[in-house]
Image: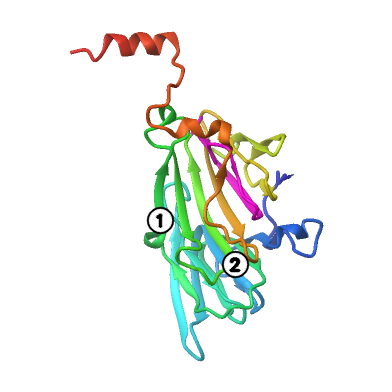
Amino acid sequence: MIIKHDRPFAKDYESIVERGGPNSDMLMDFGILSLAAGEAWDSGEADEKALLLVSGELDLAWKDGPGREQRARARRASFLDEAPTVLHLPSGSQARLVAGSGGAQVAVSRTDNPRAFSPRLYLAADCRDEERGKGTMRETSTRIVRTVFDDSDAPYANLVVGEVVAAPGKWSSYPPHHHPQPEIYHYRFHPGQGFGLTVIGEDAHLIGDKDTVLIREGQVHPQAAAPGYAMWYIWVIRHLEGRRYVQPTFVGEHAWVQASDAKIWLAPSERAAQASGPKG
């Protein structure tokens, strides 16, 4: 399912997915917080929360245990070139966010979680940064995957949070894969008039800047960025009780393309270039 968004985000918090709404089976709330310079927002104490800085400058304040207030300043000039800062909070913990001089935009993810854990601020250096697909498929699906936290380092969480940057004309979420846990993708393109394509289950969709895609149990979800346009998206997965997300299941008939020696068809001009070898 795709949720289109062809206008600027509303001031303050704009909800996109709600547990109490028609997409309650996603088991998550998701929305975008837009703050002008000097504006403040309180997260509230309910729910496990992940607050991901999309762009701008932000002062954050939260309590790390009884009476111990923590403060930090986060800046992000480019979501393509810089990994995110993310504040991860348990139920019962609240954060206050104040935008810096240029304003700020924050992606807010929430879900229920009765477990107690300590708040944690993930800095850009804490994110696991990978070039997935590199060295295979003639680099047609090489992309940057940034994992903020998952089951390996946050086994107490009910959320998994990360980002992907897909280069112009390249694929991501590839080879096609699926998992039982619900997942949300939220997109940005550079330049902003860019677009891409995604297949959710059996349905193909045109995706644009600020769109959101909902992925349900068992739905495959490969996608591609149009040539000329870089595609960035947040991904948020909700663990299920007794079925925590660890890794996806690749569609068997397409898994072969990952092999380093996979024989990929070449255009005649490419074959001729390979046959002639390097010059000089």
Mark 2 or 1, which is nearer the eye?
Answer: 2
Expressed as whole percent of the image width and height from the top left, the position of residue 156 reads 54, 72
Expressed as whole percent of the image width and height from the top left, the position of residue 29 reads 69, 63
Residue at the (39%, 13%) spot, across then down? 270
Placement of 262 over or under 3, stated as above or below: above
Residue 113 visible? The answer is: yes
Q: Are marks 2 and 1 in contact (CB under 8 Å)?
A: no
Residue at the (56%, 80%) spot, across then down? 116
Estimate how packed mark 2 is, as few (under 14), some (14 to 19) or many (20 or more) residues with alpha carbons within 10 Å.
many
Residue at the (38%, 27%) spot, across then down? 261
Q: Secondary structure at mark 1?
A: strand
What residue is pinned by disc 1?
A: 128
The amino acid type of the residue labelled 1 equals Arg
Q: Residue furthest bottom?
A: 67
Estimate how packed mark 1 is, as few (under 14), some (14 to 19) or many (20 or more) residues with alpha carbons within 10 Å.
few
The amino acid type of the residue labelled 2 equals Asn
188 part of magenta stretch? yes
Expressed as whole percent of the image width and height from the top left, the position of residue 141 reads 47, 34
Depth check, front residue: 184 or 165: 184
180 part of magenta stretch? yes
Q: Residue furthest right?
A: 22
* Residue 39 occupies quadrant: bottom right
Cα separation between marks 2 and 1: 19 Å
Which region shows up in magenta?
Answer: 168-189
* Residue 33 occupies quadrant: bottom right
Q: Secondary structure at mark 2?
A: loop
- Quarter in which the C terminus is drawn: top left
